[in-house]
Image (cartoon, rainbow, N blue to C red):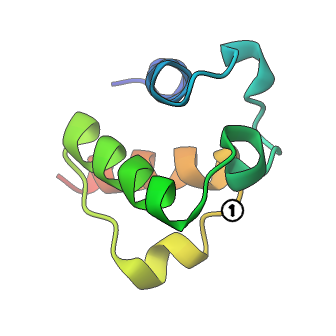
Amino acid sequence: MEKQELIAKINEVLADEFEVEVNGITPDANIKKTLQLDSLSLVDMVALIEGTFGVSIKGAEIVGIQTFESLYEFVHDRMQQK
């Protein structure tokens, strides 16, 4: 999957699941604030990304994923490793 396709798919999946406008998701936006995530919904987001894209995100790794750009990079890198 090309990176732009991946970004569009991530945005679409997250916007649908967390009921936000897809155009409100920008690369430099904070994930927790944009999606209004608490600790429980953060776990839901991780499970959704893992299930949709077949990647694994460990607890320590999620700490470093603060913006959508960092999420795109993480998922893209993991998918390239397959």
Check the image and name the residue furthest to the bottom: 60
Q: Residue at image x 53%, y 67%? A: 39
In the displayed structure, does residue 11 sit left or right of residue 25? Answer: left
Number of other residues with Cα within 10 Å of mark 1, as a class: few under 14, some 14 to 19, many 20 or more: some
Inspect the image, locate mark 1, and give the three-letter code of the amino acid beneath it: Gln
- Against 67, residue 56 (above or below) is below
Quadrant containing the N terminus in the rendered view: top left
**Circle 1 residue:** 66
**Quadrant of the rendered structure where residue 28 is?**
top right
Give above or below for 69 relative to 52: below
Q: Residue at x 49, y 58 (%)?
A: 42
Residue 19 pos. (x, y %):
58, 22
Closest to the observer, 18 or 71: 18
Label 1 SS: loop
Position in image of residue 7 (x %, y %): 54, 28
Front one among 26 and 33:
33
Residue 59, horizontal then vertical, whole percent: 40, 79
